[in-house]
Structure formats: C-alpha cells, structure tokens
Amino acid sequence: MLKGKNIIVGVTGGIAAYKAVDVVSRLKKQNANVEVIMTKHATEFVTPLTFQTLALNPVYVDMFVEPRNYDVEHISLAKKADLFLISPATANIIGKIANGIADDLLTTTIMATKSKVIFAPAMNTNMYLNPIVQKNFDYLKTLGYEFIDPGNGMLACQTYGPGRMAEPIDIVQYVISSFNDKELKGKKIVVTAGPTIEPIDPVRYITNHSSGKMGYKIAEEAQRRGAEVVLITGPTALLPPKDVEVIRVNTTMEMFNAVEAQFDSCQVLIKAAAPSDYRPEVFNHEKIKKKEGELDELNIRFVRNPDIAAHFGKLKKGQIVVGFAAETNNLIQYAEGKLKKKNFDFIVANDVSKDGAGFKSDTNIVTIIDRDGRLDDYPILDKSQVSKIILDKVVDLLNAKS
Ligand SMILES: Cc1cc2nc3c(=O)[nH]c(=O)nc-3n(C[C@H](O)[C@H](O)[C@H](O)COP(=O)(O)O)c2cc1C
C-alpha cells in the first residue's frame, strides 16, 4: 500500500523507542522505503543496527559526519520525504520544533522539510498534561503538524493515564490513510462546539461546563479526511484546528443564526455543542446592584431558546444530522427519545456523571444509537478516537446515500 513512498521515521529518546521497531517493520511490510533518523538519546534505548536491519537502509544520527553520498543529508532527506513520522516523539522534540530549534540532525531535517510531519507522542502522564507541552501541541497543530494522540494506559513509569504511544498498527494505519484519497473531499461539514453564554447584565451570564473538546476533535478529524469544515463555536479556551473556518458565537440565538446561514450548503451537521436551553427574559443594560432593605433573593425569569438540533433535524433535505445526548440519568431512554424527536441520523449518548466521560475530560464513554435501533457501546476512549468512530459512521451514511 505504501509502494514508492519515502517515509522518514524520526526516533527520539523515550522508552517507547522499542515500539518504533515494530512501526518500521510494519511500514516495510507495506513496501515503503523507510529511512530512520535517531536522536543521540534514542540510541540509548535501541541500537541503530536494529532499525538498519529492518529498514534495509543506513540509519542517521550525527549531523557532522562526512556525507555518505556527498550530499547534505538533512537537506536530501528533507527533500526526499513523502512523509515524516516521529515515533516516539518526546516532550523535548515537540518543544524544540514548536520553538524553532534545530540543534541535531532530526530537528534540522524536520525544519527543512516541506512534507507532512506527523508526531506520535509518548511520555509520562504528568509530562503529557504539562501546560507547556499541551501549548506546544496546540501551537504545532495550528501550523499543520499532525499528532496521533497517545492512549491511556499503564505507563512504563507505573502510572496510569494518557501518554502511552499509540499502537504501531494504528500509527501505520494513520500513515496509510494520509496517502489515501480523502474520503470527505467535496463535502461540507458543519460542527457546533462548546457552551453558549446567556447574558444577565453587562457583567454576569449563565453557561454550562462544556469545554468544546469533543466538537474541536470532530472538526479536526473531518478536516483531515478532506472535508470543508465550518466550526461554529461558543467561547472555549481551545485553539481551533488548522484550515477550518471558525465562526465564534456567544448565545444560543447567535449559534442558531450561524447554523442557519450554513445549513443549506452543507451535507453534514454535527451538533456537539451544549447550547443553553433558556436565556434570561430581560437583559439588564446596567449591572444589577444589591439594594439595601430588599429581600435576600433575586428572581430571574428565563425563556426558552430555540432547539437548534431539533429545528435543523426536522428541516433537513438530504443532510446527515448527528446529535449528542449528554445526560446524568436514564441515558439510553433519553437518547432514543431525542433521536426520534429531533430526527437525527444517529445520536452519540454519554453519561456526563461518569468518570472519564463528558465535558472537561479528554476522554469519553459513548453509546451510539442509530435509526435502525442499533446500539453500540464503546469503552473509555480519547475524544480523538471517538471523533474517528463518529466520522466513520458519517462516511458510511454518505456512501449509502450516493
Ligand atoms: C528511562 C528513560 C525513559 C524516558 N522516557 C521518556 C518518554 O517516554 N518520553 C519523553 O518525552 N521523555 C522521556 N525521557 C526523557 C528524554 O530521554 C529526555 O527528555 C531527552 O532529552 C530526550 O531527547 P531527544 O528528544 O533528543 O531524544 C526518558 C528518559 C529516560 C532516562
């Protein structure tokens, strides 16, 4: 499947370097031409000879050795690459690339290449969750670098959590799909994400705990599969994925209007946002003050917002509309009710009261229910994996329509 493709694999100094041996072996089995660049620290974990034997190519470590082919190696490898895969990617290399540091052969070659660069990070959970490292991921994503998110699991350091490098079989699948025709090319997908905020007065509002993470991951995956993506988002602390049109809104009414403006021209609407069902009936133009002598309570009357999901579910003319049900009880019963009432093609249900599911978490535990009554339960998964499952289902439905 990868015949004629030049894949440069960068191996850095993490314990998961041993898994990179399997990655290289699997890429070779797909008939790729694989060349390996190791950092000096990576050679503490696995020898260059191991990669050389599997890749059937010399392994590069030093920048300042006499060029083997009278060629400047970092430039020739950078030019030759159809794809760069850094597996495992340490916190260190991600930090260096995010900051423009090119102080060894691997970082210099990555800096010099115009090919797609994919990182498969692997590190201790605390390192992975460190805001500096997270900021570097986010920044590199905005520049078009791709990441194969690590999984959750027991790490070599005997801690449990995110940071374990993705499995070699999944990494190679990701590489193969990078060369495939983009399955969502020519499709416009609108994704809503995040909470909405409903102002009470100039300094106060009501909102909910939605972080937007699920919707942003869906937008990123849809873009990766070639779709034209419009992300309509309430206020979040997230950086939007690259090459996605972002429409920022505050209130449910604004989100409704933004979806309305896009709906006729899209093929798929994925409603991952948590818009507020109600808004204060009156917006006080001045800050509400505590008044001496008045009762110790404040009553605010709320009125219904439009139900965006139901409105566009009913209005659809050939579009696929995907809904979410975030519940704290009677999950399946409520989700099945919403699926029918709001005319969704399928619904992603999650019990937000469970550990590892719901709003602020990087993971989710979902059940997908479709119109044929099929009910698929999934274990705890990263939101990026959940987004793949959702888009696989969207692709199946689009294919069934065509
Ligand atoms: C036993 C051991 C395991 C390590 N595992 C990791 C790891 O999984 N991820 C990581 O980011 N750093 C890990 N480190 C730290 C890196 O080796 C260190 O940050 C180094 O500077 C990385 O260099 P490089 O990115 O140039 O290969 C480990 C260090 C040791 C000694």
Image (cartoon, rainbow, N blue to C red):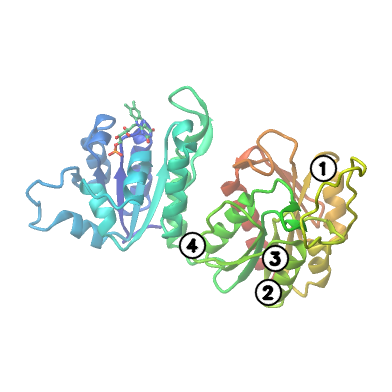
* Disc 4 element: loop
Q: Which residue, as the protein is rendered here, is positioned at the far front? A: 292
Residue at the spot x=25%, y=40% of the render? 39
Viewer-proximal residue, 37 or 244? 244
Vertical placement of 158 versus 18: above or below?
above
Q: Is residue 193 left or right of residue 290?
A: left
* Disc 3 element: strand
* Disc 1 element: helix
Q: Specify whether residue 90 is in view.
A: no
Q: Marks 2 and 1: which is nearer the front?
A: 2
Q: How crowded is mark 3: few (under 14 residues within 10 Å), some or many (20 or more)?
A: many
Residue hosting label 3: 269
- Of mark 2 and mark 1, the one earlier in the sequence is 2
Vertical placement of 200 versus 331: above or below?
below
Q: What residue type is labelled 3?
A: Leu
Q: Which mark is residue 331?
A: 1
Residue hosting label 4: 242
Q: Which amino acid does label 4 sit on?
A: Lys
Q: Which mark is residue 262?
A: 2
Q: Which amino acid does label 2 sit on?
A: Gln
Q: Is residue 176 left or right of residue 183?
A: left
Real-space Cα separation, disc 4 to disc 3, in angstroms: 19 Å
Real-space Cα separation, disc 2 to disc 1, in angstroms: 30 Å
Q: Is residue 21 left or right of residue 277?
A: left
- Of mark 1 and mark 3, the one earlier in the sequence is 3
